[in-house]
């Protein structure tokens, strides 16, 4: 059985995020030369993401991350939830995009891409707010030359609507002993003990942390096994989330 690989992913990256909790990961990335995956909101209008003083050099920082080999994903457009559509994955209960028309979604995604391009940080990677996207989202992303999604079931990348979906299952360093795993972190809500726990895990498993690009190129020689893991994880995690909600 192969050794699992991990990607350290950060959602909700905006000028007013919890830098006091994010900076230790930035420092660890420098120390261990680990490229991170960060989801940058191009034009954040979500007040819940403003928790610390804004960094006036935000876009300069993002450009610096890109130069260090980090993957910069476009995390929606304004991060404002406007529908209750869970999208294809049926994980979140609200969405910035899913449920809207193709034209509406295209306009939002294009506006976000324009801002990212203006700051010199756009890459063909999309991270959906609340993990929610639908067929129209995929069509619009393809039309706008995106190539990758930072979401999906299973433990190996797979084709989805003309893009490559790189699975994201857990918000903790959990795994099945094989495959690739994006550890999804929201620094605004992490406790100090959770920050320390993740940092400790990364230090102890440095050789297993890879770039998003490497994760996207990872495959399984037996296609049936990869498909089976997508079915298994989608069904089991949906059940777990329903039980947690009822509890």
Image (spheres, rainbow, N blue to C red):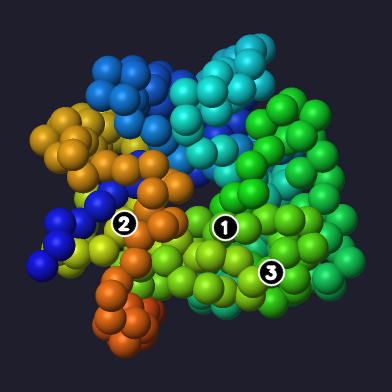
Q: Residue furthest top?
A: 56
Q: Dot 2: what SS?
A: strand
Q: Which residue is mark 2?
A: 181
Residue 228 at x, y = what percent?
A: 31, 85
Q: Nearer the viewer, residue 234 or 64?
A: 64
Residue placed under numbered mark 3 in the picture: 138
Q: CA distance from mark 3 to mark 2?
A: 22 Å
Q: Is residue 231 left or right of residue 162?
A: left
Look at the numbered disc 3 and give the secondary structure of its residue: helix
Mark 2 / mark 1, whichever is N-terminal: 1
Residue at image mark 1: 148
Query: Can residue 63 be seen by looking at this rendering?
Result: yes
Query: Horizontally, is 81 left or right of 130 in the view?
Result: right
Mark 1 in CB contact with mark 3 (< 8 angstroms):
no
User: Mark 3 or mark 2: which comes first in sequence?
Assistant: 3
Q: Measuring 62% from the left and 58% from the top, which residue is drawn there?
A: 147
User: Where is residue 226 drawn, in percent x and y?
Assistant: 32, 78
The quadrant in which the C terminus is found is: bottom left
Q: CA distance from mark 2 to mark 1?
A: 15 Å
Q: Residue at x 29, y 71 (%)?
A: 220
């Amino acid at each position: 059985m192969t050794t699992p690989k991990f990607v350290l992913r950060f959602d909700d990256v905006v000028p007013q995020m919890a830098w006091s909790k994010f900076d230790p990961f930035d420092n660890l990335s420098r120390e261990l030369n680990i490229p991170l995956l960060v989801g940058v909101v191009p034009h954040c209008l979500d007040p819940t993401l403003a928790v610390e003083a804004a960094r006036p050099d935000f876009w300069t920082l993002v450009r610096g991350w890109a130069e260090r080999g980090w993957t910069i994903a476009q995390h929606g457009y304004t991060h404002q939830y406007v529908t209750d559509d869970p999208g294809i994955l049926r994980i979140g209960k609200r969405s910035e995009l899913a449920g809207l028309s193709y034209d509406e979604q295209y306009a939002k995604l294009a506006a976000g891409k324009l801002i990212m391009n203006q700051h010199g940080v756009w890459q063909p990677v999309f991270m959906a707010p609340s993990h929610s996207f639908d067929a129209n989202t995929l069509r619009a992303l393809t039309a706008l030359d995106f190539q990758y999604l930072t979401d999906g079931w299973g433990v190996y990348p797979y084709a989805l609507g003309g893009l490559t979906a790189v699975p994201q299952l857990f918000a903790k360093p959990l795994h099945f002993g094989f495959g690739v795993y994006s550890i999804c972190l929201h620094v605004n809500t992490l406790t100090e003990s959770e920050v320390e726990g993740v940092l400790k895990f990364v230090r102890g498993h440095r050789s297993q942390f890879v770039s998003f690009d490497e994760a996207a190129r990872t495959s399984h020689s037996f296609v049936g096994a990869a498909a089976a893991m997508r079915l298994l994880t989608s069904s089991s995690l949906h059940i777990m989330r329903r039980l947690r909600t009822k509890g």
